[in-house]
């Protein structure tokens, strides 16, 4: 599955937290499970998922996981494995 050029820009708009939520959605966790795992409220997870769906132009969670697989941003059963981007570390002084 190829990603249209216009949609490639949307990936760069996902925050680090949204990428974490995306990975957990792809792992099959419910919003409540994601909230517990990230120690945030379910409402915050709902908002993150809503934002992710909008940014990726995905209509539902299945389409979102397909989008994430197409980007190589999730790992399912050791297939399509990759590391999510991590923020640069600050040098120790």
Image (cartoon, rainbow, N blue to C red):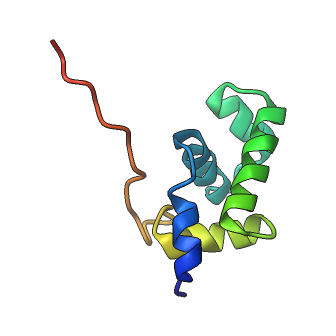
The residue lying at 43 percent from left, 66 percent from top is: 78
Instruction: Answer left or right for 71 relative to 42.
Output: left
Q: Nearer the viewer, residue 46 or 39?
A: 46
The quarter of the picture where residue 61 lies is: bottom right
Instruction: Answer left or right for 47 relative to 71.
Output: right
Q: Nearer the viewer, residue 41 or 9?
A: 9
Of the 4 image quadrants, the one containing the C terminus is top left
46 shown above or below 72? above
The residue lying at 49 percent from left, 66 percent from top is: 77
Q: Whole-percent x and y of residue 76?
A: 52, 65
The residue lying at 84 percent from left, 34 percent from top is: 43
Of the 4 image quadrants, the one containing the N terminus is bottom right
13 shown above or below 56? above
Instruction: Answer left or right for 58 relative to 7.
Output: right
Q: Nearer the viewer, residue 26 or 8?
A: 8
27 shown above or below 77? above
Most extreme residue toward the bottom is 1
Q: How many numbered discs, if any?
A: 0
């Amino acid at each position: 599955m190829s990603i249209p050029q216009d949609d490639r820009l949307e990936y760069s708009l996902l925050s680090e937290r949204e990428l974490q939520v995306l990975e957990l959605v792809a792992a099959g966790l419910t919003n409540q499970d994601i909230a517990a795992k990230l120690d945030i409220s379910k409402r915050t997870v709902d908002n993150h998922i809503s934002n992710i769906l909008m940014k990726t132009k995905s209509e539902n969670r299945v389409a979102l996981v397909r989008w994430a697989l197409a980007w190589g941003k999730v790992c399912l059963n050791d297939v399509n494995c990759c590391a999510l981007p991590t923020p640069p570390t600050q040098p120790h002084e």
